[in-house]
Amino acid sequence: MNGSFFYSIFGACLHGSSMKLLLPLLFSSASLFSASAQWIAPAGGMWSTAANWTSGGPPNGTGEVASFTSSVPGPNPSVLLDIPVSLGQITFDFTTDYTISPVAPADVFTFTQSSSSASAVIEVTASVGNGAHTIDADIALANNLSVSQGSTGIFTLNGILSGASRSLIKTGVGVLALTNASNSYSGGTSLTQGTISIINDGNLGSSGTTLTIGNAILQYAASVSHTRPFSLTSTARIDVVAASTATVMGLIDGSGSLTKGDAGILILTNTNTYSGGTNISAGTLSISSDGNLGDASGRLDLSGGTLNVIPSLTIPRSGSFSNASTITSGSSVTFTGNFNGAGSVTFSGGGTLTLVGLNSYTGGTTIATATQLAGTTDGLQGNIALADATSILSFSQNFNGTYGGEISGTGSLNKLGTGTVTFSGASTGFSGAATIQEGRLNVDGSLANASLLSVTATGTLGGSGTVGTTTCSGIISPGSSPGTLTIDGTLTFNPGSQVILEIAPLEADQIAVTGTATFLDVVPLTVDPTPGFYGFAADYTILTSAGLLGAGIPPGFSPVVSTNAAFVPSITSSLTDIFLHVDISEPFAVFPFSNKNTAAVGNNIDELFAAGQLSPEMVSIFNLFIGQSFAVINNALDQMHPALFSALVDEQIEVLSQLIQLFHRFPYLPCACANPNRFWFEPFGASLSVKQDGIEIGYQGNSGGFALGYDGEIAQNWVFGLGASWNIAHLHWHDSRGKSTINGLYGAAYTDYQWDSFYCGAALLSGIDFYDTDRNIQFLSLHRHAGASFHSWDVVGQIRSAYLFGSPQAFFYPYLNVDYLYLATEQVRERGAGSLNLKVLNRGDGTLRTEVGLALQVQDVNREETMCISPGISFGFVNMTPIQSPDYTAFFQNTTIPFKTEGWDKTWNLLHVDFGLSFAYKCFSLGLQYNIELSPDSETLYYNQHGNLSIETKW
């Protein structure tokens, strides 16, 4: 009900004389106006006519609702607004189209609600039908206006929207068309859902007010240019209809994204800050700086539209191509970001576009007329089509890379930059001209149908693929370590050309020309040996053709040089082919040795060959290496040196370090016998396993023998003794490298002294070892045995000390042992392996062995003290450090030039555990002892076991 009318009636009632006159009018007022009414006119009519509404009258008041949802109106209902009307809401829901038109300019809508915080509402629903409804009357906003448009028909506001500080809020999935250029509401526009369609900047209210777009669409139905700021809060879309251009000069900010849709052109000119990225799905988005696309963190995705870049600039952002898209520019544009996706892209506009990011899109690339696409092998991926002869494709980079796609079309192909580009794809559909202007182009695929391949003075052609007719003013370096470059056509060497060929033991780079090869001048040839073993000479065919022509024939190639002085090349030719012969003075000059010992052997062979000391048998042996793998050759060389003899030294050092510990009378619980003289006898055995470590091969050593001795007191608590020992050891090198037997005879003198709880002792052992070795040499088809018999002298000194704590029934003691072991080995002369026999010069080895630990011994004695049993255990840490370990100096049989190799030279840190048990009856005792030493590494490289049986009597 109209509030002003109610209060006028109420005021009249206060005057008693008028009561009878106004009461009928008061009670009849409901028939004049209503808070909510539905339009029911059958064929249009005036707003103020009460009969056109339900409830007896038209709505006209704050918060009142007018509904146009009746099924009564005819096919084109027209509502004439003949009075100014205040409303809170208008609702449309009908199949046919309602139109509300003013009768006079003053007949306007005022949208108002009783609460200033509430919004007035225009609601278009589709429960009854999807009509396209229109309001032609002006609308004044006393409150914010929310337009909820849910119809598939367009809802149009043709009148002026006004209202200071009032905003327009668009919701619903349908289209709201704003057509009046004089809209002046100044609270801004919020497009949260559906579409707002405009034809003028003024449609969106006062100039300078913000348009906020959520998950919705702004449609330009005509060309528009404005400076209005935008704020994007979600996945905003801007559509520009075909043949129209929208220019947005205002700032676009917000956390949302921008999608360009429809066939028209959208131009962005401001340095925008929206951060959700940009998607071009249709039409054209035109920019003049990367900042037009929002914050630098935002992506650039093309899903079917066109990006037009006007000036020269760099775009660093990444993105995708998900459908057929276009990038056009008449200037120079560089994309440094990474683009992916399954879509394709066409570059057009006559400018130069450069791709240098790590791109992975798979739909292919088209270069349009008069347009150049440049980039690197990171940026240029997939198939690339050149539209016509004016299209240009350039690979420009200063690093190496591979292009695996296919190039097609009739344009131009260029290689720029100092890096190497490798074509691995079959670009048989490319029929244009290719030019290598800088750097190197390797063709491992095909450019066979290129009209002409030109190599400039600063370019290099390589690879193992196929190219077409070629003219060279620079370098041809065929192959890929090595390989054959096929020229399906003719080849012309211009003056200034040169050729670089790699050779390998069994093949060389080759140029195979199906047509003629023309040398306009002699061409310098450089031969570059790749790693391998070539033997002592090699021959190759390096160029084949249908005929050799030109002033440079013969010889074609001159001068001919090598990158390695040990390889001396020379050239011969026929009418069609050119041949290379190489004499090799150092056959191992470019071989990659696996370690210093194999290098020593190989270098010695080079020296022997240069000195003329390499026998024909040795030459035939080393010729077996030609064409073999590095591993096979290194394995063979590793069997030609004496470094494995160091295992004999290690085996003896371990045997002697265990043996010398027997020559002592260590303090022990004496049971019932304390006689001063003792005779003892101990058989022993040991097993030592050493795994391969670095360049030295491992081995297994098993040994056994006995020791005996006599000692007696020469003063109180001071013992002196003499002893002897014999040992035999059997050693087997791993990998079937051979075996050895060692017999040793030793004599020893020792002394021990105890003062209260302190004990010290010293021992000296010396002897001779007799070796019989059988070194197994087996590689390829060769199998030989190199045998030798020789001897060495041994000297071992030991100092022991301990401090005893305990009682007559048990004691424990920390101990320290220091040994120095020296072996002097005589010269070794092998037999049985022919020219592979070695003469090894005599040498001396010294090792310092230190052991520190803690031991425990207890005893149990019978009542008569005639029998006892005594177990013991000790734990220790052992360090064995080579003090003197010279290289092995050796000669091959009947040669005078030595070589040196390195044997085991390792410091071992070991854990030592010892278990003992002795039985005594009066002055006779029997003991058992077992100990292990092992390296505490994950693979247990060193593992030694030692056991002995001791028998002794005292008197």
Image (cartoon, helix red, strand yellow):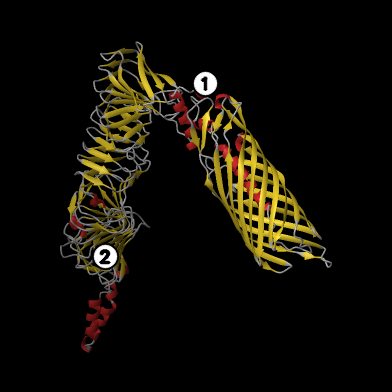
| Front residue (pair 603, 851) | 851
Q: 293 or 868, which is in the foreground?
A: 868
> Where does the image place residue 375, in percent across and percent down from the top left?
29, 38
Q: Give me the residue at 22% from left, 84% from top.
A: 11
Toward which corner of the image does residue 554 lie, by quadrant?
A: top left
Question: Where residue 620 sits in the image (x, y, percent)?
Answer: 52, 21
Answer with mark 1 or mark 2, whichever residue precedes in sequence: 2
Of residue 846 and residue 571, the one placed in the foreground of this image is 846
- Residue denoted by label 1: 620
Viewer-proximal residue among 355 and 167: 355
Kind of residue at disc 2: Leu
Outermost residue, top side: 575
Q: Callout 2: helix, strand or loop?
A: strand
Mark 1 element type? helix
Between the residue at mark 1 and the residue at mark 2, the CA separation in whole angstroms equals: 102 Å
User: In the shown orientation, is residue 804 left or right of residue 881?
Assistant: right
Reading the image, the residue beneath label 2 is 145
Are there few (<14), some (14-19), or many (20+) residues within 10 Å of tag 1?
A: few
- Depicted 856 relative to depicted 826: above or below: below
Q: Position of residue 8 (x, y in %)?
A: 22, 80
Decide if residue 197 is on the left or right side of residue 532.
left
Q: Are marks 1 and 2 in contact (CB under 8 Å)?
A: no
Residue type marked 1? Ser
